Amino acid sequence: MPFLQHSWLRTWHDLDLAAPEELRLRLLAAYAEPQRHYHTRQHLQECLAHFAAVLALAQRPGEVALALWFHDAVYDPRAGDNEARSAEWARAALLSHGASAEQAGRVQALILATRHCEAPTEPDAQLLLDIDLAILGAAPARFAEYAAQVRREYAWVDEVHYQTQRRGVLQGFLDRPVIYHTVWFRERYEQAARANLRESVSGLA
């Protein structure tokens, strides 16, 4: 069975709900939209693969997995409400497929945490954000590919403005006391992430 299909079935099993195939296909179609270059099925699969490695660390694994499936379900690089719209889609989908309001609300909150506006205190949110940022600690070749993919998503932004804004975003991660919230990700990716970020910021200077 393909990895993404297996993940989908496992996710809904952990939620104690029937897995809706039509919803999975809608999500995969969303991740294949033409404006996407990084926020694609590749990113989704990488996130879910990271989660598979840390499944035992999740307090509510089904909710974390579904939040990963939906965290970039809506993606318009020109918009500022992608996370909110993705979170609302997830909430509505859960409610329509038999989830409780509490489950739907927790998944919605997890997705909203991926705005990376503040450090989360809830363990599942910390795990989710570390998974989302695992790309920063990727091998140099994958990190370079990621940087190029992000640039293509912002092809409509002129080079000077893009470099200034992107440098600010990456420097923001470097300025954090720690990039990763969980010990598991910090031990494996913190040093590599800082090396990747320093090199990228230097190249954007």
Image (tube, helix red, strand yellow):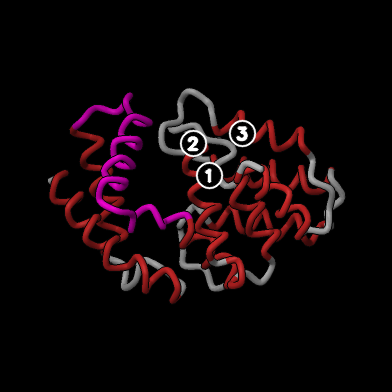
Q: Residue at x 84, y 45 (%)?
A: 97
Residue 40: numbered disc: 2
Q: Are marks 1 and 2 in contact (CB under 8 Å)?
A: yes
Q: Residue at x 30, y 47 (%)?
A: 143
The magenta-colored residue range is: 132-159
The alpha-carbon separation of the residues under discs 3 and 2 comes to: 9 Å
Query: Which residue is the site of mark 1?
Result: 44
Residue 130 magenta-highlighted? no
Q: Amino acid at mark 1?
A: Leu
State the image coordinates of residue 124 (x, y, percent, origin top left).
Answer: 60, 67
Residue that sits furthest to the front in the current view: 1
**Nearer the observer, 167 or 49:** 49
Q: Residue at x 75, y 60 (%)?
A: 14
The local secondary structure at tag 3 comes to helix
**Nearer the observer, 202 or 137:** 137
Q: Amino acid at mark 3?
A: Leu
Mark toward the start of the polypeptide (1 vs 3): 3
Q: Quadrant of residue 30?
A: top right
The alpha-carbon separation of the residues under discs 1 and 2 comes to: 6 Å
The local secondary structure at tag 1 comes to helix
The alpha-carbon separation of the residues under discs 1 and 3 comes to: 9 Å
Crowding at label 1, few (<14), some or many (≥20) Cα neighbours within 10 Å?
A: many
State the image coordinates of residue 87 (x, y, percent, origin top left).
Answer: 64, 47
Residue 10: numbered disc: none
Q: Amino acid at mark 2?
A: Thr
Query: Which residue is the site of mark 3?
Result: 28
Residue 152 magenta-highlighted? yes
Residue that sits furthest to the bottom in the current view: 183
* Screen quadrant of the N terminus: top right
Q: Are marks 3 and 2 in contact (CB under 8 Å)?
A: no
